[in-house]
């Protein structure tokens, strides 16, 4: 059990502090006895006093828990009253131990003397009470902080899932339309291939958590499944060139981060060219950053300050929102004109290497 877990476990944390605190009190008194050159038998008295203080302050814990939500005036009144009573009784026990064990043979004739000079004990119990409330408030603050972090994390996860799953119906709609068209023109072989590829691709999307990151090599494999579906539609009109370095292959990336970019290129570039077009996918690692690039040789579009002048669809917007959610401001998503024509999308994210599996 680490420190954070110990703090969160209120019951165990109380007993650890209770025992450690009174051991510390006994140690300080022992050092004081050495300074004043008291006899060794006084050590036993110190231990008894600390043990008595430990036992007598335990009921205060349960009393304070019962009045925790009381008004401040009531709370302060109970704390001071309880501390005074417990401190005075503890003082009586300490003097009894001192006179019966260390100064055996001397006993005051009046019980009044047992209650004299008990303010030091009351102050110590008050300090104990203050520490109890301080620790209690600290634990509550930590608990609220954990709840806030958990709520924030859940909100981010929900947002990521919404952004990821928003893409799938759009892609599925286009693919099913294409399959329907192939069936109508009686191209059953191509339709069967598309259904098979679609099944493999959807299995990948369902088995991949949109919150977790996957190796780029795995992402490219899924992307090839998607492109094989599109190649059935476009045949020779769609050409794909992939250039991924060995180091970049092992990089972790958000699942299906490239698919909407490729879909965007196919929709606005390849589909608009009668002779078809080419899509280039490249990835490399430079200065501990992963650089991803998707480009096409389509007609291009108007770009202002690295963004489309007119943004349509959800693909690019969702991709940027996912990167923002996952990496905060430690990423870049830039659109630029490709040479000699077309659109180029550059993504930069921190390089995280995937762990090797045995």
Image (cartoon, rainbow, N blue to C red):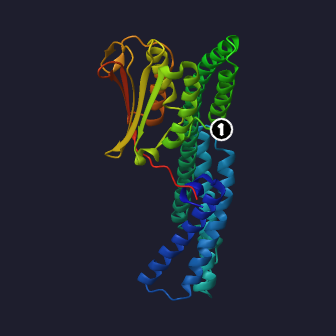
Q: Is residue 130 above or below residue 272?
A: below
Q: Looking at the image, how many numbered discs can be counted on the residues?
A: 1
| The C terminus, quarter of image | bottom right
Residue in view at x 64 percent, y 30 percent: 197
Residue in view at x 60 percent, y 26 percent: 165
Q: Is residue 297 above or below residue 322?
A: above
Query: Can residue 159 be seen in the rendering of this structure?
Result: no
Q: Is residue 279 left or right of residue 92?
A: left
Which quarter of the figure has residue 67? top right
Q: Nearer the viewer, residue 255 or 130?
A: 255
Q: Is residue 58 left or right of residue 26?
A: right
| The N terminus, quarter of image | bottom right
Q: Nearer the viewer, residue 216 or 224?
A: 224
Q: Badge 1 is on which residue?
A: 207
Q: Position of residue 336 (x, y in %)?
A: 32, 22
Q: Position of residue 138 (x, y in %)?
A: 53, 48
Q: Nearer the viewer, residue 135 or 80?
A: 135
Residue count near mark 1 (Cα–Cα under 10 Å), binned few <14, some 14–19, many ≥20: few
Residue in view at x 59 percent, y 78 percent: 47
Residue in view at x 44 percent, y 83 percent: 34
Which quarter of the figure has residue 255? top right
Q: Is residue 237 above or below residue 206?
A: above
Q: Position of residue 116 (x, y in %)?
A: 56, 68
Q: Nearer the viewer, residue 79 or 58?
A: 58
Secondary structure type for disc 1: helix
Query: Can residue 335 be seen in the rendering of this structure?
Result: yes
Q: Position of residue 88 (x, y in %)?
A: 60, 63
């Amino acid at each position: 059990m680490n420190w954070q877990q110990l703090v969160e476990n209120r019951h165990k944390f109380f007993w650890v502090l209770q025992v450690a605190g009174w051991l510390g009190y006994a140690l300080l008194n022992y050092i004081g006895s050495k300074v004043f050159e008291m006899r060794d038998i006084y050590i036993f008295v110190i231990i008894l006093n600390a043990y008595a203080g430990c036992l007598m302050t335990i009921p205060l814990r349960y009393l304070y828990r019962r009045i925790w939500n009381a008004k401040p005036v009531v709370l302060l009144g109970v704390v001071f009253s309880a501390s005074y009573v417990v401190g005075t009784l503890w003082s009586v026990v300490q003097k009894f131990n001192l006179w019966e064990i260390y100064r055996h043979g001397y006993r005051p004739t009046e019980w009044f003397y047992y209650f004299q000079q008990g303010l030091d004990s009351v102050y110590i119990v008050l300090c104990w009470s203050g520490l109890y409330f301080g620790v209690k408030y600290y634990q509550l603050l930590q608990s609220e902080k954990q709840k806030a972090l958990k709520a924030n994390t859940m909100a981010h996860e929900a947002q990521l899932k919404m952004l990821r799953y928003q893409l799938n119906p759009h892609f599925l709609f286009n693919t099913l339309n294409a399959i329907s068209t192939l069936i109508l023109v009686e191209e059953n072989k191509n339709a069967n291939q598309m259904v098979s590829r679609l099944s493999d691709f959807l299995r990948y999307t369902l088995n991949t958590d949109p919150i977790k990151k996957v190796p780029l090599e795995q992402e490219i494999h899924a992307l090839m499944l998607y492109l094989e579906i599109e190649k059935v539609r476009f045949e020779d009109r769609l050409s794909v060139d992939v250039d991924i370095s060995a180091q970049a292959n092992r990089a972790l990336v958000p699942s299906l981060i490239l698919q909407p970019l490729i879909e965007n290129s196919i929709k606005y570039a390849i589909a608009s060219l009668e002779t078809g077009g080419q899509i280039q996918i490249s990835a490399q690692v430079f200065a501990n950053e992963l650089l991803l690039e998707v480009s096409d040789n389509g007609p291009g579009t108007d770009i202002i300050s690295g963004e489309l002048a007119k943004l349509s669809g959800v693909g690019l917007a969702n991709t940027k929102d996912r990167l923002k959610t996952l990496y905060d401001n430690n990423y870049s998503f830039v659109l630029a004109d490709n040479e000699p024509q077309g659109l180029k999308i550059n993504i930069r994210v921190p390089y995280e290497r995937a762990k090797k599996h045995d």
